[in-house]
Amino acid sequence: MMKIFNGLLRFRRGPWEMLATILIALGVVMLMQPFAIGLYSYSFIVTLVGTVMFIIVSHFPE
């Protein structure tokens, strides 16, 4: 856990890509769930933020 936290602080690609991927997956799950309209409403924004974050993070150093 500390290794991931250090990677985030040092702007390394691996931990940030994992966070962006989790955001994308969370947005897709929010989009497909039928229970809460609030989650559905924010699903596009969460997916978009994760996608833009992934594009930016892919330029970070290994």
Image (cartoon, helix red, strand yellow):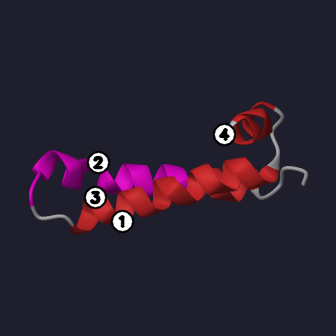
Label 3 CA crowd tier, 10 Å (few <14, some 14–19, many 20+): many
Magenta stretch: includes residue 45: yes
Q: How many marks?
A: 4
CB within 8 Å, label 3 to label 1: yes
CB within 8 Å, label 1 to label 4: no
Residue at 29%, 48% in the rendered image = 42
Measured in 3D between alpha carbons, the distance from the residue under mark 1 to the one under mark 2, in whole angstroms, is 10 Å
Give whichever of 56, 15 is nearer the camera: 15
Measured in 3D between alpha carbons, the distance from the residue under mark 3 to the one under mark 1, in whole angstroms, is 5 Å
Measured in 3D between alpha carbons, the distance from the residue under mark 1 to the one under mark 4, in whole angstroms, is 25 Å
Residue at 16%, 45% in the rendered image = 38
Residue stretch in magenta: 35-50
Q: Residue furthest right?
A: 61
Any mark on residue 8, and which?
none
Residue 41 drawn at (x, y percent): 22, 50
- Mark 4 = which residue? 1
Marks 1, 4: nearer the viewer? 4
Q: Earlier in the sequence, mark 3 or mark 4?
A: 4
Q: Secondary structure at mark 1?
A: helix
* Three-letter code, disc 2: Tyr
Any mark on residue 42, and which?
2
Any mark on residue 30, and which?
3
Residue 29 drawn at (x, y percent): 31, 64
